[in-house]
Image (tube, rainbow, N blue to C red):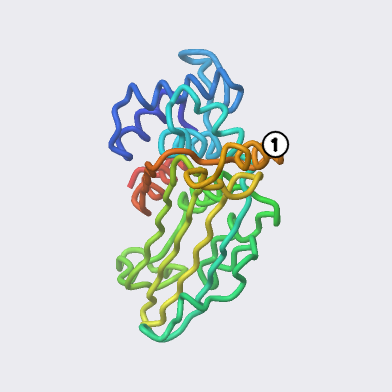
């Protein structure tokens, strides 16, 4: 496993942010006790897939890096909502809007063999999902045209495979979306978004101060202001960081 310094450089390069931002986020998380601690040089810590997940969450999801520790603590208690699944069907025939299990937090990911996600307990967080994807990406095999010098076929022959991860701020909603078309033109779709354990952030722009006070007293977050920010990354980041953590160089 790499060191924190190596991880922050890799994450910065992959996401397209400056190294100072990634290093600062790591420092804030370390001081908050959210990531692996260790010394320098030969005694430097060896980071984990969960460390990488928290670092990327801090960079992409928190409003400000200085608040990353508190944000990660909340994200670690997020729970799944709005689960949608469209099972394998001929391309164009899948009806994503009518997908089943609209409130189930359990992933299906049929035929994708992503057991590091599908085997998660029911009460898992968005960070758990990202960690599982990094662990899977270290050895994932899927391709439409496998190299001849590697006779072992991929686990899934695909024409199209995307995974998108998005972060909606300040609502602190995280969304995972899978879209696949296999070699037989069968299409699969699954998505789920995760909200803080307190539930959805209420939109406070049209609420009275009294109503806001009551909602917050009940432990529900209230969003103020009109600005929404969405940051997202793709399967490219998952693959680059996952293979990096696993020590895969080719």
Vertical placement of residue 32 versus 190, above or below: above
Residue 78 percent across, percent down from the top left: 61, 46
* Image location (x, y in percent) of residue 186: 41, 82
Residue at far top of view? 40
The residue shown at (65%, 65%) is 104
Whole-percent x, y for residue 167 in the image: 44, 46
Residue 149 quadrant? bottom left
Camera-side residue: 80 or 188? 80
Q: Residue at x 58, y 37 (%)?
A: 209
> For mark 1, does the 10 Å Cα neighbourhood hold few (<14), some (14 to 19), or many (20 or more) residues?
few
**Residue position marked by numbered label 1 in the rendering:** 217
Q: Which residue shows up at 57% across the image and 28% down it?
A: 70
145 horizontally vs 60: left or right:
left
* Secondary element at image label 1: helix
> How many callouts does the rendering have?
1
Q: Nearer the viewer, residue 37 or 32?
A: 32
In the displayed structure, 94 sits above or below 193; it is below
Q: Quadrant of residue 208?
A: top right
Residue at 70 percent of width and 52 percent of height: 123
- Residue 233: image x %, image y %? 36, 48
Which residue occupies the foreground of this view, 128 or 168?
168
Between 249 and 85, the residue placed more toward the observer is 85
- Compared with 29, 242 (above or below) is below
């Amino acid at each position: 496993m790499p060191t924190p310094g190596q991880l922050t450089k890799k994450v910065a390069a992959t996401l397209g942010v400056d190294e100072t931002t990634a290093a600062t986020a790591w420092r804030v998380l370390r001081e908050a006790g959210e990531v692996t601690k260790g010394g320098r040089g030969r005694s430097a810590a060896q980071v984990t897939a969960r460390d990488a997940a928290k670092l990327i969450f801090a960079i992409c999801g928190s409003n400000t890096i200085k608040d990353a520790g508190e944000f990660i603590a909340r994200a670690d208690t997020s729970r799944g909502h709005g689960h949608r699944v469209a099972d394998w069907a001929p391309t164009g025939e899948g009806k994503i809007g009518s997908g089943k299990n609209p409130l189930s937090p359990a992933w299906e990911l049929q035929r994708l063999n992503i057991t590091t996600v599908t085997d998660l307990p029911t009460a898992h967080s968005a960070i758990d999902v990202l960690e599982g994807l990094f662990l899977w990406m270290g050895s994932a095999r899927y391709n439409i045209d496998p190299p001849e010098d590697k006779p072992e076929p991929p686990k899934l022959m695909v024409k199209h495979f995307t995974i998108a991860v998005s972060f909606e701020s300040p609502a602190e909603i995280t969304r995972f979306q899978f879209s696949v078309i296999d070699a037989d033109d069968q299409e699969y779709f699954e998505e789920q978004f995760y909200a803080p354990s307190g539930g959805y952030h209420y939109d406070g722009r049209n609420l009275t101060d009294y109503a806001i006070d009551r909602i917050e007293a009940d432990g529900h977050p209230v969003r103020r202001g009109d600005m929404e920010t969405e940051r997202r990354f793709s399967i490219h980041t998952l693959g680059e960081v996952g293979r990096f953590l696993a020590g895969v160089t080719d």
